[in-house]
Amino acid sequence: MAKGDCEAAVATAAAADEIMLSKMPGVEWLNTRGHLHLPARAAAAMPVMERAFELLGGDSVAMQSKRLSKLPNDLLHEASRTMVEVDEFQHFTSMRGLTLDVLEDQSVGYDAAAYRELVRTWHPKSDRYFHSKITRGFPGPFSRGRGRAYFDLLRDVVSPLMGYQVIRVPAVDEATSDSLKGAAAYARSRHTLLALI
């Protein structure tokens, strides 16, 4: 399946409920240097991000040397400034579980306990996904998974400080197509979206 098909299927299913989701454009404050290049308005995110970066074995020199560019995001409900992140199985690594622990009692736009359960279910598969691919700033084994967990957390804690709410839609069904998987993911998260948008 093509990249973005699952997100497109979520947007199509949402449109049937008259929830209009579009591809979210990149924003300056979500970028490849993460917490090392945050605006002053997002300073409150620094303690959590620094703790997670250290826990995930991040290398600040390597991170700072990355080409500065905006991160790709999933979907946006523009009227309510709601970011909708569609998380397929590769997001549910054991490293993501570590970042959920760093959040402690912070409020996020999804059920953190349910996400921990998804991590327990999926991490044997998701930890192996591109396990040898390197993400600069996270040297060593499982670099890609550690980087993904870090940048997911970055969206969770920085976006609210910048005036956006974040909703995460798990899309982990073993469906035959991204279209079916996206539609099922929307159906499970429909009540959350309808309540917040």
Image (cartoon, grey):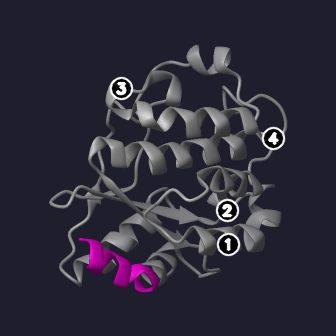
Q: Nearer the viewer, mark 1 or mark 3?
A: 3
Q: Which residue is mark 1?
A: 118
Identify the secondary structure beneath mark 1: helix
**Residue sitting at 79 percent across and 43 percent down?**
142
Distance from disc 4 to disc 3, alpha carbons, whole Å, reads: 32 Å
Residue type at mark 1 is: Leu
> Looking at this view, is 169 or 35 the one in front?
35
Total numbered labels = 4
What percent of the width, then of the height, locates residue 106?
Answer: 51, 56
Q: Which residue is mark 4?
A: 132
Residues shaded magenta = 187-197
Q: Is residue 106 visible?
A: yes
Q: Which residue is mark 3?
A: 39
What percent of the width, then of the height, locates residue 100?
Answer: 64, 56
Q: Sequence order check: which comes first, mark 1 or mark 4?
A: 1
Q: Sequence order check: which comes first, mark 4 or mark 3?
A: 3
Q: Is residue 188 magenta?
A: yes
